[in-house]
Image: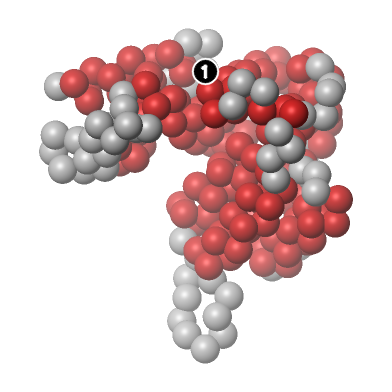
Amino acid sequence: MADRNTQAQQLRVMLELQNSMNTKVHPQWREQNFEFYRAIWVECAELMDHYGWKWWKKQSPDTEQVALELIDIWHFGLSILLRSGRTEDELIAQINEQLVISTDQPDFRLDLEAFAAATLADRQFHVREFARLMAGIEMDLDALYRGYVGKNVLNFFRQDHGYKDGSYRKNWQDGREDNEHLVELVQTLDASRPTFKDDLYTALQTRYQS
């Protein structure tokens, strides 16, 4: 588990990355009233499918896919927080206070439904309830950070290499998708380094061009 200073640094990096990606999509994204809350509850439904809820068939939670869905939700949640008008330091303090990764609910699905309901009730991002979901799959902040930075950097990499005009190759030289290469590269790099996101981008570029 990251100490307080490391946690604050991780949160700062994620907030800056999210603002950069949103700005790449639309320079005035804060004024566009994008329905980030809607993206969150749709992701919740996809997450539920990965966890399993059908009583008429045998299902086991796919925790890797659940974790990926939580990382996607975090993107949209950060966007809501950034649009609130609070400063970066104020947001870091708020998240630090509310991101208590614990739950007293043995049924993950009930925590997920409570989170989705809270999201739909006021169209905001509820960090405390999100932290309960992290606890439900034993995800700590370090894992969230590695996963988030990885996905964000890959999104930037795709945009920079022709994703929009169709020239980007999602399947790389060995036939595997870029997501698979991303997972491997994240594991080889030191996520505690301040240059983690830049190191990862460089590693992606080196492997993509090889």
Can you give x and y, in whole percent of width and height, for residue 177 in the image? 26, 42
- Choose between 144 and 113: the one closer to the eye: 113
Instruction: Give the residue type at disc 1.
Output: Ser
Q: Residue at x 22, y 24 (%)?
A: 207
What residue did someone put label 1 on?
192
Name above or below for residue 110 compared with residue 187: below
Q: Give the quadrant of residue 79.
A: top right
Q: Residue at x 82, y 36 (%)?
A: 98
Position of residue 110 in the picture relative to residue 190 (left or right):
right
Q: Give the quadrant of residue 157.
A: top left
- Choose between 34 and 92: the one closer to the eye: 34
Q: Residue at x 77, y 22 (%)?
A: 92
Name above or below for residue 175 compared with residue 15: below
Position of residue 49 in the picture relative to residue 202 (left or right):
right
- Choose between 88 and 52: the one closer to the eye: 88
Q: Residues within 10 Å of mark 1 (few under 14, many from 20)?
A: some
Q: Residue at x 52, y 89 (%)?
A: 56
Q: Quadrant of the N terminus?
A: top right
Can you give x and y, in whole percent of width and height, for residue 68 in the image? 50, 47
Can you give x and y, in whole percent of width and height, for residue 139 in the image? 59, 44
Can you give x and y, in whole percent of width and height, for residue 188 in the image? 34, 25
- Choose between 188 and 197: the one closer to the eye: 197
